[in-house]
Amino acid sequence: LVGPERGFDVDSIDPTIRQQLEQHVQLVDYETAKASAETEPVDVIATFAHVLVGKELVTALSPSRALKAVVNYGVGVDHINLDEMRELGIPVCNTPGVLSGATADMAWALLMACARNIVQCDAYCRSDAYTVYRNMIFLGRDVHHKTIGIVGLGRIGTEIARRAKGFHMRILYHNRSPNKDAEDKLGATLVSLDDLLKESDYVVLVCPCTPETTGLISTPQLKLMKSTAFLVNIARGPVVDTDALVAALQSKEIAGAGLDVTDPEPLPLGHPLRTLDNVVLAPHRGSATAEARAAMAQLVIDNVLAAARGTPLLTRCA
Ligand code: 8YV
């Protein structure tokens, strides 16, 4: 089941989820569920990022308060009003762990694309301009032995740090609480956000989007970064103040940005972030590998069936 918002393609939902769940439960889409909610309230809501789930939606679909769980396809649950779910006594499940490696790989893909101008190189090689070999074009920046600053050293952040260790990088992190394991095994150092921004060559945002992290990176923070440093965002768009980022990129206060997520998402046509040549964009593809998607789908299926059958939920997060 999906929510009422526009701006996403309902048919893009993993068909595995539909096919497998259909064998066990009756699946209804949002409009159908809403129309028949009085007589047939839904038992479980399965949803994903980009669909705002709160008291209003839950009450519209299950006015008799029969809802047993909200099951999210994805690890981030910032689109679900957890306070309201708590108030209603509705458990929330997500898909942690199974997408950490894929999302860390994506952070690295953006980081490397930024550092070595991969997108510009590709366009150049396809264009008529590439007729002779040139030595001094598209010079990038080293990644190895540089400093990476990871904002949010949870499951995905730790995977990013493990890859950074392979590149012999100095690893700084900023987190709500210390990650002793990453300090011991990866040599990661906990620092203030300001110090991380000042010292890092690559700043990677991978924190959850909460009221505390919304707008975390704005003009004062971007000013702390080196003019040679890159910002990679695989967290959520609102963690960065978009206008401040555009200004920093236009004035070359930072070298560039790799953005898997933006605010708004998608960006409107003609938005500066769509045209700046020191930006690499991806359409929220962090966990989008065949392997991670299959594992996410399986967790959604298992959680929906557990909720429907009244057996313990597998990955409850709230
Ligand atoms: C998903 C995500 O692509 O896990 C998350 O929090 O943002 C992504 O993995 C998305 O939620 C699926 O629609």
Image (cartoon, rainbow, N blue to C red):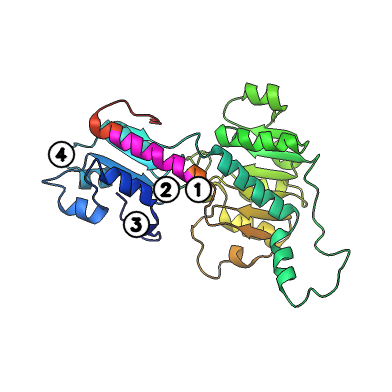
Marker disc for residue 290: 1
Marker disc for residue 64: 4
Q: Residue furthest bottom?
A: 128
Badge 2 or badge 3: first in the primary sequence: 3
**Does dot 2 land on a helix, a strand or a loop?**
loop
Residue closest to the eye, 72 or 227? 72
Q: Is residue 299 magenta?
A: yes
Question: Is 229 situated left or right of 212 in this image?
Answer: right
- Marks 2 and 3, how far apart in space? 11 Å
**Does dot 3 land on a helix, a strand or a loop?**
loop
Total labels: the figure holds: 4
Label the magenta part by its dominant secondary structure. Answer: helix
Other-residue count near label 1 (Cα within 10 Å), few / some / many at <14 / 14–19 / ≥20: few
**Does dot 1 land on a helix, a strand or a loop?**
helix
Q: Pointer 1 and pointer 4: residues touching (CB < 8 Å)?
A: no
Residue at mark 2: C-beta within 8 A of ligand 1: yes
Q: Pointer 1 and pointer 2: residues touching (CB < 8 Å)?
A: no
Residue 77 makes an appearance in the image: no
Specify the amino acid type for callout 4.
Ser
Question: Is 10 situated left or right of 168 in this image?
Answer: left
**Which residue is under mark 2?**
49
Callout in the foreground (1, 4):
1
Marker disc for residue 5: 3
> Over which residues does the magenta segment extend?
293-305
- Give the x, y percent position of residue 165: 73, 34
Residue 120 makes an appearance in the image: yes
